[in-house]
Amino acid sequence: MDLVDEIIKKVTDASGEGGSDSQADSLDTILGALLDDADDILGALVTTADGLPKAQRLPGDLDPRRFSAMSSALLALSTTMAREAGKGETMNVLIEGKEGNTYVMHAGNNLVLTVFTKIKPNLGLTLAQARRAADKVVLFAREKAKGM
C-alpha cells in the first residue's frame, strides 16, 4: 500500500464520508452549474480541508475519496511552501498535464474545490469560472453556519 492509499484509508476510516444529504445536494447543484456553464471543465469536487469528500461531479472512474485526500494535502503543502517562501497565502494550485489541467483552490476556511479541465483549456476563463464556483461554495457554507 502506498502512502496516499494509507492516508486515504486512515481519513475515511476515522471520519466516514462526511456531510449531510441536503448539504451534498446543495453543493452538487453548485458543481452541476459549473459543469453546465464551462465547456472546458470536465469534473469537480468539493472536499473538507482535512480530505473528506462533500460533493462531486467527476469524470470517468476517478475515486472521490482518493482525490479529496490528495487535493487537501496538495493545498496544505502549497500553503506551507508559499508562506515559508514569503509569498503570502496560496490562492490556487494549478497542475498542467498533457491530458488536461487540475485546479485546487480554497473555498472558504474549511472547504476545497478541485476542478479538472480538458486539454488546453482557456486558462483565464476556466480559472474565473472555478473561482466563481468556489465563491458560491463559500456563501453556501456561511449560510449553513448561520443556520446552526
Image (cartoon, rainbow, N blue to C red):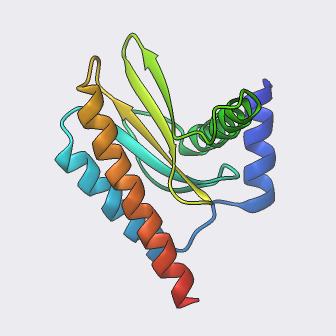
Residue for point 19% across, 49% down: 36
Q: Position of residue 19 (x, y in %)?
A: 58, 69
Q: 83 and 43: which one is in front?
A: 83
Residue 135 percent coordinates (x, y): 40, 59
Q: Is residue 147 left or right of residue 110?
A: left
Of residues 15 and 138, the one drawn nearer to the viewer in this rendering: 138
Name the spot of residue 137 as percent of width and height, x first.
43, 62
Question: Residue 83 appears in which quarter of the rendering?
Answer: top right
Question: Is residue 77 shown above or below 113?
Answer: above
Q: Residue placed farthest to the bottom in the image? A: 147
| Left or right: residue 23 compared with residue 38 | right
Location of the N terminus (image quadrant): top right
Q: Is residue 21 visible?
A: no
Q: Which residue is located at x 72 percent, y 26 percent?
A: 85
Q: Position of residue 94 (x, y in %)?
A: 47, 27
Q: Residue furthest top?
A: 98
Measured along the vertical axis of the image, is residue 132 above or below residue 138?
Answer: above
Above or below residue 89? Residue 61 is: above
The residue positioned 34% from the left and 37% from the top of the image is: 127
Which of the 4 image quadrants contains residue 48?
A: bottom right
Of the 4 image quadrants, the one containing the C terminus is bottom right
Residue sitting at x 28%, y 55% = 32
Give whichever of 54, 13 is nearer the camera.
Answer: 54
